[in-house]
């Protein structure tokens, strides 16, 4: 009969290892002090190259956080949190639970740039690190009115706030915002009118649902609201997709697209014009994707403000712009 280690064997032999859980046990200070800590191992216990790691931490732990709208209303939204810190070459690892504990110390506050800065300072202190980064992602509701019927409905926007605190003491704040719009092709519209004019042929110009992902860096001491970022996108592109639609709204949307034809290159430049003029933003990067209804591929563009040492147009994750 083979020896079983965790379970009683068929012949009745008891396992040498007893499995049990003591619900009544509580760890006291002395017990906790006696527990081994992998963060205190000798330097030679580090596996691989003895080099620093730029980011290590936790991703996608969730909790409800409070957000203040531009109008002063407080919303509580499910939020996905990513928190990372740097790790020096001589350290084995970090105590990741301290990142969460630092975050929970401030969980009841209203989410602002200053609030994120407090958490990052807690990271630097509690995890004993030199660089810290925090990103919180959520779906932000805004009431949008139909074009002509007067109906209203909720549009939801993918938004993320990001804070970065470097070892030089600099604190940078970013907003990531996704704007979904319709893009009607100028070339297709011209060719359709040509066919109508020359051959009385009826045609439908192609258009498609499209997305712009805007990342902005807030100027120091300035505050730009989510509603402000949305307004800049809407002013630039005009043709945001609709929530509530009756026949008169659908007709209006066709007319709106006809008035604002745009290639993906046009979309990038239109957005650049609006964001470049906003003094509360020091830098930005914008990626656009038009999910072509003519082609089996997408048309894409990336543009940045052009600040020295700032964002570069190195965005290549266009698959994330599906909508």
Image (tube, rainbow, N blue to C red):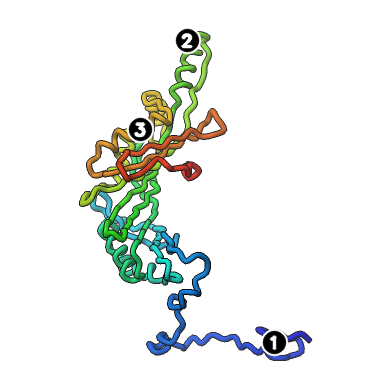
- Compute the Cα span from label 1 to label 2: 88 Å
Using the image as rendered, state which of residue 159 and residue 90 is in the foreground.
Answer: 90
Image x and y of residue 293, in percent: 52, 30
Q: Nearer the viewer, mark 2 or mark 3?
A: 3
- For the question of whether residue 148 can be seen, the reply is no
Calculate the distance from the C-alpha at mark 2 to the C-alpha at mark 3.
29 Å
Image quarter of residue 149: top left
Depth check: 25 or 143 in front? Answer: 25
Residue that numbered label 2 is attached to:
197
* Point 38% across, 29% down: residue: 266
Q: At 57% from the left edge and 86% from the top edge, which residue is drawn?
A: 20
Q: Earlier in the sequence, mark 1 or mark 3?
A: 1
Question: Which residue bears the numbered disc 3?
Answer: 237
Q: Find residue 301 and report its image quarter.
A: top left
Q: Position of residue 132 (x, y in %)?
A: 35, 61
Q: In the rendered image, is residue 68 in sight? A: yes
Among numbered discs 2 and 3, the one appearing first in the sequence: 2
Q: Reading the chain from its start, which is encountered first: label 1 or label 2?
A: 1
Q: SS class of the residue under badge 2?
A: helix
Q: Which mark's residue is nearer the viewer, 1 or 2?
A: 1
Disc 1 is placed on an element classified as loop
Secondary structure found at label 3: helix
Q: Which mark is residue 8?
A: 1
């Amino acid at each position: 009969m083979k020896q079983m280690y965790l379970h009683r064997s068929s012949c009745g032999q008891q396992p040498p290892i007893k499995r049990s859980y003591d619900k009544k046990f509580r760890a006291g200070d002395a017990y906790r002090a006696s527990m081994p800590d992998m963060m205190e191992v000798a330097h030679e216990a580090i596996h691989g190259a003895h080099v620093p790691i730029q980011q290590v931490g936790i991703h996608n732990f969730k909790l409800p956080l409070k957000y203040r709208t531009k109008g002063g209303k407080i919303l509580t939204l499910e939020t996905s949190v990513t928190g990372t810190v740097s790790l020096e070459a001589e350290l084995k690892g970090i105590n990741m639970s301290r990142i969460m504990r630092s975050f929970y110390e401030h969980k009841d506050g209203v989410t602002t740039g200053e609030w994120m800065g407090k958490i990052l300072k807690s990271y630097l202190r509690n995890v004993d690190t030199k660089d810290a980064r925090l990103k919180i992602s959520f779906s932000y509701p805004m009431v949008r009115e139909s074009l002509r019927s007067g109906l209203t409905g909720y549009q939801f926007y993918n938004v993320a706030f990001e804070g970065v605190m470097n070892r030089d003491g600099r604190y940078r704040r970013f907003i990531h915002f996704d704007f979904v719009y319709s893009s009607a092709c100028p070339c297709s519209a011209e060719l359709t009118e040509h066919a109508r004019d020359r051959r009385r042929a009826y045609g439908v110009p192609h258009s498609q649902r499209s997305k712009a992902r805007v990342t902005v860096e807030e100027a120091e001491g300035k505050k730009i609201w989510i509603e402000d970022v949305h307004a800049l996108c809407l002013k630039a592109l005009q043709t945001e997709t609709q929530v509530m639609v009756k026949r008169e709204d659908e007709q209006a949307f066709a007319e709106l697209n006809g008035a604002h034809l745009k290639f993906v290159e046009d979309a990038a430049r239109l957005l650049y014009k609006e964001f470049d003029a906003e003094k509360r933003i020091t830098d930005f990067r914008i990626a656009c994707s038009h999910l072509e209804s003519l082609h089996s591929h997408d048309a894409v563009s990336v543009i940045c403000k052009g600040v020295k040492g700032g964002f570069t147009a190195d965005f290549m994750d266009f698959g994330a712009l599906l909508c």
